Amino acid sequence: MSTFVLVHGSWHDGSAWQAVISQLEAKRHQAFAPTIAGHGKGVNKNVNHAQCTQSIVDYIVDKDLTDIVLLGHSFGGTIIAKVAEAISTRIRRLIFFDAFVLNDGESLRDNLPFPTQELIDDLVEASGDNTIMMPFDIWRETFLNDADLDLAKSSYAQLSPEPYQPFIDKLDLKQFYSLPIPKSYLYCTEDNVLPQGEWGWHPRLSSRLGLFRLVQMPGSHEVMFSNPVGLAEKIIVAGRD
């Protein structure tokens, strides 16, 4: 059996994985879902990318987790790459789940289409506190496009403003690209958060991993809400030896 550490994406906290963890545990795996620093409701949002990364490193070390399969969803992909640099000996495999894979020296923002960059910049300016809040219509049509309205509303209620600084921090990833840790890319075929094609998750971002295992499934960017059973099954496949 495997030990999974599931790292959430933007606007989320660890509770986003609750249904998926139940499915993994039902199959006798261990699963943990830490919350990244600066994420969740009622917390200080003034964090940078290094602080976000350190919070996940600390969680894994404090629980003395070893031989783990470390998964990062979306923004979480940028976190697990830096976590891998810090504690590579504790990690058996990395899974990038519809996740950003940055080139050395890039920020997450650098990997967004220009209209999306403009939209985020406008949301940050309107926030007054250097955060980004997801508009419901974008959540409904782009992030969770495979769910009914009730699920879209209930899941949206779990979101909170996203710190902007980690989006614009440039990451030194030279060490990450030298690590021998096996990698998988889990891709949902109806994910429209990045436009399909030239700007899409796969193969544009996945191919940066070099040698990797590709696992695909139908679904949206937020399939942990719309199909946690199917997602758990694919996570097991992506994480197997």
Image (cartoon, grey):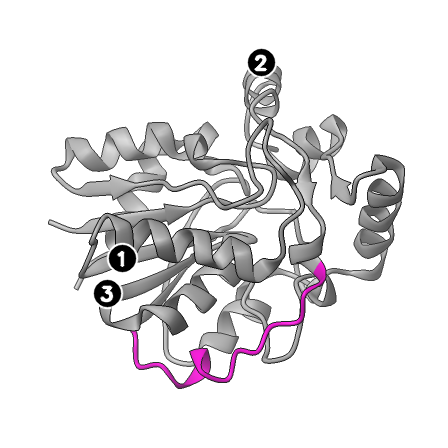
Amino acid, disc 2: Asp
Around disc 3, counting alpha carbons within 10 Å, would you say few (fewer than 14), some (14 to 19), or many (20 or more)?
some
Alpha carbon separation for disc pair 1 and 3: 9 Å
Picture quadrant of residue 185: bottom left
Verify whether residue 87 appears in magenta.
no
> For the residues carrying marks 2 and 1, which lies nearer the camera in this image?
1
Percent across and percent down for residue 54 are: 45, 58
Q: In the rendered view, would you say 168 is above or below 120? A: below
Amino acid, disc 1: Val
Picture quadrant of residue 48: bottom right
Amino acid, disc 3: Arg
Picture quadrant of residue 91: bottom left
Residue 195 in sight in this render: no
Query: In this figure, which residue is indicated by the disc labeled 2?
Result: 150
Examine the residues drawn in magenta and state their main secondary structure.
loop
> For the residues carrying marks 2 and 3, which lies nearer the camera in this image?
3
Specify whether 134 is left or right of 88: right
Q: In the rendered view, would you say 49 is above or below 105? A: above
| Stretch of the chain drawn in magenta | 168-181
Percent across and percent down for residue 51 are: 54, 56
**Residue displayed at 58% across by 42% down:** 38
Q: Is mark 3 on a helix, strand or loop?
A: helix
**Residue displayed at 23% across by 37% down:** 24
Around disc 2, counting alpha carbons within 10 Å, would you say few (fewer than 14), some (14 to 19), or many (20 or more)?
few
**Residue displayed at 55% across by 62% down:** 50
Q: Which mark is residue 90?
A: 3
**Residue displayed at 89% across by 37% down:** 126
Query: In this figure, which residue is indicated by the disc labeled 1?
Result: 69
Q: Which mark is residue 178?
A: none
